[in-house]
Image (cartoon, rainbow, N blue to C red):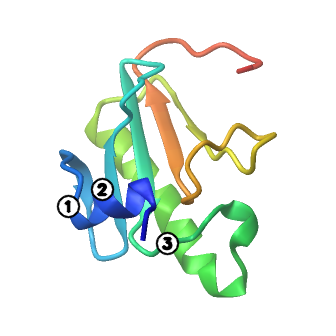
């Protein structure tokens, strides 16, 4: 498979895990937009949020729990943002479902 995030998850492309378990993997974004900017991906290849169905419900909830747990571990108690870009118009640049966890500074709205 030529998916960039699948290669990161399998170790074919080196990364440093910020969190990992049997169904998810989190690592630093290579173009951080905040002091804390991590990507949380499912180990299973899913192209986007739009490609999910009923069978993915527990995984989607787990990915959000992972984001909250990492935020707690990173001391982001003043606040943080979790973003899921979906599709070209939504700003998704890698066709593998991923959550952005951003924090460590005041985040403005609208985001872009």
Contact (CB < 8 A) between labels 2 and 1? Answer: yes
Image: 41 above or below 71? below
Which residue is nearer to you in this view: 58 or 92?
A: 92
Q: On the image, numbered disc 2 is attached to which residue?
A: 8
Secondary-structure class at tag 3: loop
Measuring from the top left, give residue 34's x and y in whole percent. Answer: 44, 19
In-image side of 8 versus 95 (left or right):
left
Which residue is nearer to you in this view: 62 or 9?
A: 9
Secondary-structure class at tag 1: loop
Q: Quadrant of residue 24?
A: bottom left
Q: On the image, numbered disc 3 is attached to which residue?
A: 45
Q: Which circle's residue, 3 or 1, is located before the other in the chain?
A: 1
Which residue is nearer to you in this view: 96 or 21?
A: 96
Secondary-structure class at tag 2: helix
Measured in 3D between alpha carbons, the distance from the residue under mark 3 to the one under mark 1, in whole angstroms, is 15 Å
Measured in 3D between alpha carbons, the distance from the residue under mark 2 to the one under mark 1, in whole angstroms, is 5 Å
Q: Which circle's residue, 3 or 2, is located before the other in the chain?
A: 2
Q: On the image, numbered disc 1 is attached to which residue?
A: 11
Q: How many marks?
A: 3
Image: 64 above or below 105? below
Contact (CB < 8 A) between labels 3 and 1? Answer: no
* Mark 2 surroundings within 10 Å by alpha-carbon count, few (fewer than 14), some (14 through 19), many (20 or more): some
- The residue drawn where x is 42% and y is 24% is 31
- Name the quarter where the N terminus is drawn: bottom left
Measuring from the top left, give residue 27's x and y in whole percent. Answer: 31, 45
- Say the numbered circle drawn on residue 67: none
* Mark 3 surroundings within 10 Å by alpha-carbon count, few (fewer than 14), some (14 through 19), many (20 or more): some
In-image side of 89 versus 71 (left or right):
right
- The residue drawn where x is 70% and y is 37% is 91
């Amino acid at each position: 498979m030529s998916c960039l995030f699948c290669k990161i998850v399998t170790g074919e492309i080196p990364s440093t895990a910020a969190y990992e378990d049997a169904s998810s993997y989190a690592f630093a974004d290579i173009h951080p937009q905040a002091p804390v900017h991590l990507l949380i991906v499912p180990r299973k290849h899913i192209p986007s949020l739009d490609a999910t169905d009923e069978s993915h419900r527990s995984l989607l909830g787990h990915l959000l729990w992972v984001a909250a747990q990492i935020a707690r571990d990173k001391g982001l108690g003043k606040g943080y943002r979790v973003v899921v870009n979906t599709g070209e118009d939504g700003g998704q640049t890698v066709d593998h479902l991923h959550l952005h966890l951003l924090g460590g500074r005041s985040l403005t709205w609208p985001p872009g």
